Image: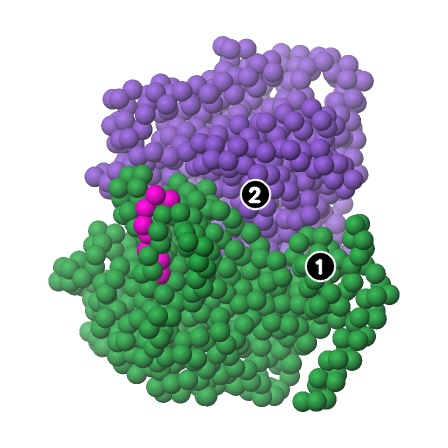
Chain colours: A green, B purple
Amino acid sequence: MKVDPITLEVIRNRLIAASRDIRRTVERAAYSPVLYEVVDFSCGVLDSEANLIAETPGLPIFLANLSDAVTATYKTIGRANLKPDDVIICNDPYNGGGTHCPDIVVLCPAFYEGEIRGWAAFRGHTVDMGGIYPGGWYSNTTEIFQEGFRLPPVKLMVEGKPNEDVLRLIRANTRVPDAVLGDIRAMIAAVRTGSKRLIEIIERYGLEVTLSAFQEILDQGERLSRAAIRRIPNGVYTAEAFLDGDGNDDAPLDEKLRLKVTITVEDETMTIDFTGTAPQCRGPMNVPEPSTISSARYGFKVVTTPDLPNNEGFFRPLKIIIPEGSLLKPRFPAATAMWPAPTTTIPDLILKALAPAIPDRVRAGHFGDSMADFIYGVDPRNGRYYVCAEPDGGGYGGKPFEDGESALFSMDLGDTYNVPAEVAEVRYPWRVERFELILDSGGPGKFRGGLGVRRDYRIIGHRAGLTVTTDRVKYTPPWGLFGGKDGKPNITVVFRKDGQEERWRKVSNLPLEPDEVVSFQTGGGGGYGSPLERDPQLVLEDVRNGYVSLAKAKEDYGVVIAGNELKVDLKATEELRRKMREAAKVGEDAR
Amino acid sequence: MYRLSTDVGGTFTDGVLLDEETGQIAVNKVSTTPGNPAIGTIQSIERFNVPLGEVSFLVHGTTVVINALIEGKGAKTALITTSGFRDVLEIGRSNRTEMYNALYRKPRPLVPRYLRLEVKERIGADGAVLVPLDMTGLDSLIDYLKREGVESIAVCLLNAYANPAHEEEIGRLLRERWPEVAISLSHKITRRFYEYERTSTTVQNAYVMPVVQRYLRSLEEELSGRRFESDLQIMQSNGGVMTSTVAREIPIAMVESGPAAGALGAAQLASLIGYENVISYDMGGTTAKTSIIKGGLPETTDQYLVEGRPILLPVVDLREIGAGGGSIAWIDEAGALHVGPQSAGADPGPACYMRGGTEPTVTDANLQLGILNPDYFLGGEMAISPELARKAIAKVADYFKLSTDEAALGIIKIVNTNMSGLLQSMTVKRGYDPRDFALVAFGGAGPIHAAAIAKELNIPTVIVPPFPGVFSAWGMLMADLRHDFTRTYIKLMEEADLAEVNRLFRELEGQIRELFTRENITEENVVLSYALGLRYYGQEHTLDVPAPAKLTAADKRRLAQSFDELHLRVYGHNAPEEPKEIVSLKVIGLGKVKKPTLQTIPRGRKTPPAEAKLGEREVYRGDGRYEKFSIYRRDRLLAGNAILGPAIIEEPTATTVVEEGQHCSVDRYGNLIISLGLG
């Protein structure tokens, strides 16, 4: 039986409402704000075969992880052993979790007439699931056992009754049991609501109609996706980038990790192949396979159907190849705590690879790292221990028709918000000295890259510890496209009391003395098109606005600006640009 | 004496006149004059033909602020910040709202970087002066801004919420040396922390200030030329009004005036007829807006976005989706049917308007189904074409091989699901049960869809006020003056110094009373209420807990307990043993205006008078089934009349549907009360 188009649209809207209700329930009931403040979650409803049918947008980098949790549940517990009102939990990066230990998935089957007809699932970040230090974010672990407590898919509730054994195990293995169990209770309530909504839909529209609606929703997604791929010219496209590596600066593990992507577009299908990517590393920068799939899907989504909602059907025409034992499909028990680092670069690389094919729909590279930092210590104002964990925004690449955006969070993050200076000064014993755009950080181009941000904290009246995991500093700066130049890369700087200036990429537990300043400086985006083609008036505006210095206007853009009134000397500019073009040509010929 | 309101909308300017002696109401609609909306406003006022000298209370709701923001037609504005922080406005919160969009575009700052100037000064989070204000460069700064043609200046310094001394000093010096320039100081608008949001609010205020000042001057000249002598009242986003004098200083407070008036009207109407909890449901040509009224007041939120830019002022908490009479039904590339959010708007409008629109809309579907009467649209003043509606809907029907009626019904089903989804998510989010609410339906299209949506959500009662097409303007007539002041004050509850809290409450009160004095509100009409914004230590969001005017030691425990209870209701759990933190102190001031007595309509018997019933019309109900709906003229119904569905009640600006099994009664004010009989 085929569902009629009107009932189909009504069911589609109800499914979207069901996944929104899952999110709302968590927002209402979650104990710790990290879940909904940082939007560090994803949720949705799936069919019985683990196909995502509808989702509420959360973190884009979780796109494939809900399906993986359902598949892992079938494999581990067995379909026949699941009962109505069971609720499942898992976080094992190698079995259902798919990321790192603090991320847990809670899921609930929807039974109708004795069979599983669908699933409601929620994935979210918990404050602590054990591991060597609080928080689950490490730069120096070498195996998964160091990183926290792992749960393969197990029953958190058995036919509507809490499984006290599992709850006790969790309680015993986290540093903050009340908060973690509080959040887990919220997730249970949420997925049960979602599962109930699914059953209500089946009851109202009938099993046959609902299941055929599921199929049609997936089929329509597939059709839309195929139509979108058709708008990308056939061909084989490649791109690569190097991550700095997963080591501490003081004790390097593996350095210089290659990420390589080869994309084949053939009519209505696309293959994203990661062959050529570095082998898995000794440190924690390995990406569990489901997260690699998510980040590939993320890039695919951006170049195909960015405005449409998600479901599994959209990804049917996409094939993903990941070499076994690589950084992107590590073998157990490789460490995965810093898995987001590579996944920030992967979707950007997909854009880079496809740039020659769809130049008007991509932008140049972004700063490429979440720039997460951790500062902790004892607040001298009240004697309480504090930990601050936050990412920072940086520059995005120039676009085909305008400059890149400044100061946005990296691609792995979604609709996440920064910590305002006024909030930071209340919460933490620091003074925010500046929060500003960095001059000349945007890659020069016809359309300039967006600017990076500098945020300086002065530590007040106590000794603090600092952990940073800054990447994309040494080997691959934010890239330019079509003659655009690279943006300035990320860096973290510590200004010591004795006037010393230390530049850091990754470091754990670095002591900061009272009155010392730590400065997080994010990279700018790459430029799009040759800077010699940039409208001199736009360069002048950039100079007036302090985005570009006078010296760089001349050096990078060949624009001569003169006089107190700041005017473009058009003749001198033309002459300089001509010389620069010639010099570039000579350079090219010499190569 | 009379009361008069005018509400400027995108297409129409609505006017309502109330005779205070008789309670009688007159309404009109004139075309909005986008070039200068004051012209349409005056046209609406003149149509009532009453001497303005006899108007005691004149309220105006205007889109001049929102339009200036949306169209980018504000004044050339400069911003003065603390050194190191001039980019706060451009950095924003670094979030990306469209995460799959490679070409995502952030909201652009309203002040370009070359007009964002830094001064040397620094206030600490505790209000201490860490670096004294250095204004030695002021004269050259003023010269620079004059040369650049700046008309308006926003000043937002870091931590000014804790100590505004430096902002005040800059304001004083600017006024002294450059009296013509418009000045907005952040602490005068809000004293809450979050520097990006406060800067954004101050900048938007500065950006629209010269525009609003010119607009109000021109409107007031017109009014006083017509012998209007009272204060012009301006509708605000918070559901209250303010005088035009205050509006000139905080113009940003009027950004959402029209929608807020609708919610306020629903609240006033509900209280008048004895409903405490209602959902307001306003469906027009382009969007559907809804808000929740609990305990007689519209719920407000502390923050609002316009074009992606935050405004840190209380605003009636409205949710909106692109579902209106003009919403277009369309088929996507995969062959799926959708309705909205694109709208045919007012021009060309739905296909049946005969203005060149060819896409099928919700209004076309309602006409096709027999819900709308082609001979009585706008009371028969506007001709609409069932033939063009049918042709437009045939696009959908042919594609899916459905009958035209089936396609039309499908469009309505889809738009109804979209709207019930919106209402459901609003109530679920707050932990409310829709069954505890009544639905107040208005706007041109609201009363058509209300009964079906209520049925879907098990809302037991639907209320359709008289003149639903101009209900927002009616709401304005019922408004009190209102000023909200919030002060960030962060302290653990147990460590809070009550003398300090009480002192701050008195300060906030002082600010409110000062405004009311300027607005000619006498002391006995000022009603103040107090609240603390509380959270558990470590949380981000706060909940407002009502507080007494003067806190005593005993109140601490009581407030903590109220917070635990509120947290349980709103979030479903609480943690009484956790320490509580105060984040903000709030005072809401109402300047009470005497409420008019509304006119009642004549009483009739249970059966409506014969002349009210116009006959019957067949309406398509699905599966090939047509049902006979009784048709009534609303203006001929009498109080006490009862109508059993299926029925359609027609009036010039709206059509009310009573579904089968539903029961509609007319109350003494002429409200239609539809009871769904849900037991």
Q: Residues within 10 Å of mark 1 (few under 14, many from 20)?
A: many
Mark 2 vs mark 1: tell me if same chain. no
x then y, percent, for residue A184: 26, 57
**Residue B543 image-quadrant placement:** top left
- Number of marks present in the image shown: 2
Q: Residue at x 41, y 61 (%)?
A: A372
Taking the view exactly as shown, the residue that stands out farthest to the right is A571
- For mark 2, what is the residue? B83
Using the rendered image of the protein, determine whether residue B27 is visible from the camera's viewpoint: no
Residue B51 image position (x, y, % from top left): 76, 15
- Distance from disc 2 to disc 1, alpha carbons, whole Å, reads 22 Å
In the picture, the quarter occupied by the N terminus of chain A is: bottom left
Q: Is residue B272 above or below residue B51?
A: below
- Quadrant location of the C terminus of chain A in the rendered image: bottom right
Residue with the most extreme front position: A498
Who's the residue at 71% across and 46% down the image? B71
| Secondary structure beneath label 1 | helix
Residue B477, quarter of the rendered image: top right
Chain holding disc 2: B
